[in-house]
């Protein structure tokens, strides 16, 4: 590798690290607000919240590394264009495309590292953060009682229309309890109430102006109705916070090897399913598509960094704008468009409308084509 390649690689390193740090902090801000809410208002232990924060970092880095490469290319080539170094290279017979060799080599090594990172580190981090969140919910069920969402607490199913986080005041409360080996059901409906905790072991619902419907015997149509002005319901919960090792993993918690094994299992289930059962076959195919989408995304997202190097270099050379301000503006615009295509393609592929390969690699292909066209213009 020649000196010009080392020179251009060195020009990319500082803006790459700066962009990586900046984008990571920006994407973490929303996460930090949610985590502080867990500590301040919901009383989750600081150590547990710190672990959730730590396990969330790989997901953020999986996106920000490619964005940082775009920033590095925009800043470096913008500076080269402003300082007339690109013109000097051309006067020495060094084409614009030749200057890309070093930065592309740098981005290729970043691509290889991120492929390993997305396949090994990211799935395990996603798995651990979900385990920890489930453990937090198991110890402090009140944390996950949210508006308009059904929440399971032991053998209770809780639904509230409105919840005040500061006071614990509830509006439109519905609680379903399973009784006697899950044969009988008791449903409590109240206009309002209050949610509080007694230490870490008991949560208390104080309900106002409601009705209790309780089924009787084995016939569901037999029930009794009890009206009340005030009803107190106490639910005991586990007092120990421990990370539970869930055996089940979603596709985002799987390595490539796991995803391939899951796809083979779905193929086997499809073959064993009655061809007339079209609904089950369609569901199995969609599940298989989800696994295939995740496999392609592990590689297509890191590959975006390579095409971003070409695109960023071409844009910066043509506009002759250096500095971080212009670079961040261009990068936000480019990555927003890229991410819209990525998320849209992911959803279409999961539903079976578009092959997963095309859906996940189309944003890279489109970005690469635009970058190539602009790079050709830089040769003029």
Image (spheres, rainbow, N blue to C red):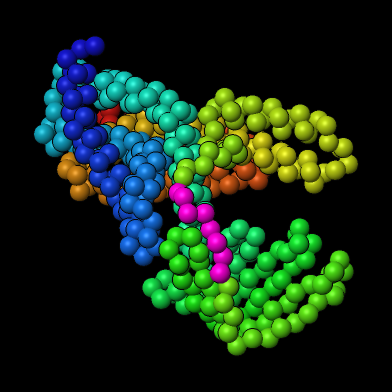
Left or right: 286, with 96 as reference point: right
Q: Residue at x 20, y 12 (%)?
A: 2
Question: Residue 109 at what x, y percent from top left?
Answer: 34, 22
Q: Is 264 on the left-hand or right-hand side of 333? A: right
Q: Position of residue 128 (x, y in %)?
A: 46, 39
What is the residue that sits farthest to the top in this orientation? Answer: 1
Q: Name which quarter of the figure residue 161 lies in.
A: bottom right
**As displayed, is residue 72 above or below residue 214?**
above
Residue 354 pos. (x, y %): 63, 40
Q: Is residue 329 magenta?
A: no
Judge by depth and name the residue closer to the eye, 209 or 144.
209
Name the foreground residue: 356 vs 263.
263
Name the main secondary structure of what is drawn in magenta: loop
Q: Nearer the viewer, residue 39 or 363?
A: 39
Instruction: Please tell me whether residue 93 is drawn above or below residue 125 in the rendered image.
Output: above
Q: Please give the name of the residue rendered at 47% of the width and 77% of the height, measured from the top-left corner.
A: 169
Q: Quadrant of the N terminus?
A: top left
Q: Nearer the viewer, residue 255 or 77?
A: 255
**Residue 160 seen in the figure:** no
Q: Position of residue 20 (x, y in %)?
A: 27, 39
In the figure, is residue 24 to the left or right of 210? left
User: What residue is rendered at 19% in x and 44% in y?
Assistant: 324
Magenta-colored span: 234-241
As for residue 236 lying within the magenta part, the answer is: yes
Occupied quadrant, residue 352 = top right
The image quadrant where one finds the C terminus is: top left
Residue at 54%, 27% (x, y): give it. 256
Q: Is residue 295 visible?
A: yes
Instruction: Give the side of residue 329 with respect to residue 254, left or right.
Output: left
Q: How many marks?
A: 0
Q: Residue furthest left?
A: 83
């Amino acid at each position: 590798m020649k000196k010009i390649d080392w020179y251009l690689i060195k020009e990319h390193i500082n803006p790459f690290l700066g962009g990586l740090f900046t984008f990571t902090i920006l994407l973490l801000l929303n996460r930090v607000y949610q985590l502080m809410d867990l500590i301040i208002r919901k009383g989750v232990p600081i150590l547990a919240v710190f672990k959730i924060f730590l396990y969330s970092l790989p997901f953020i880095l999986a996106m920000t590394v490619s964005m940082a490469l775009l920033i590095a290319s925009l800043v470096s080539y913008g500076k080269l264009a402003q300082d007339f170094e690109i013109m000097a290279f051309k006067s020495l017979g060094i084409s614009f495309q030749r200057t890309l060799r070093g930065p592309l080599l740098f981005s290729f090594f970043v691509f290889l590292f991120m492929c390993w990172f997305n396949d090994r580190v990211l799935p395990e981090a996603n798995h651990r953060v979900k385990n920890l969140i489930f453990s937090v919910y198991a110890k402090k069920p009140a944390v996950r009682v949210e508006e308009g969402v059904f929440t399971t607490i032991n053998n209770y199913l809780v639904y509230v229309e409105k919840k005040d986080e500061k006071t614990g005041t509830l509006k439109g409360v519905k609680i379903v309890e399973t009784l006697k080996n899950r044969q009988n059901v008791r449903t409590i409906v109240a206009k309002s109430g209050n949610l509080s905790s007694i230490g870490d072991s008991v949560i208390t619902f104080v309900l106002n102006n409601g009705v209790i419907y309780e089924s009787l015997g084995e016939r569901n149509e037999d029930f009794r109705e009890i009206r009340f002005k005030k009803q107190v319901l106490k639910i005991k919960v586990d007092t120990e916070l421990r990370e539970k090792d869930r055996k089940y993993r979603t596709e985002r918690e799987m390595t490539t090897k796991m995803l391939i094994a899951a796809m083979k299992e779905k193929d086997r289930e499809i073959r064993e399913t009655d061809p007339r059962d079209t609904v089950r076959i369609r569901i199995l195919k969609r599940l298989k598509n989800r696994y295939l989408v995740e496999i392609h995304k592990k590689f297509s997202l890191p590959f975006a960094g390579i095409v971003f190097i070409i695109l960023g270099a071409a844009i910066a050379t043509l506009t002759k704008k250096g500095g971080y301000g212009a670079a961040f503006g261009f990068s936000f615009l480019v990555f927003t468009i890229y991410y819209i295509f990525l998320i849209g393609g992911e959803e279409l592929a999961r539903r079976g409308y578009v092959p997963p390969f095309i859906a996940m690699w189309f944003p890279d292909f489109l970005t690469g084509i635009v970058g190539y066209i602009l790079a050709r213009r830089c040769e003029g």
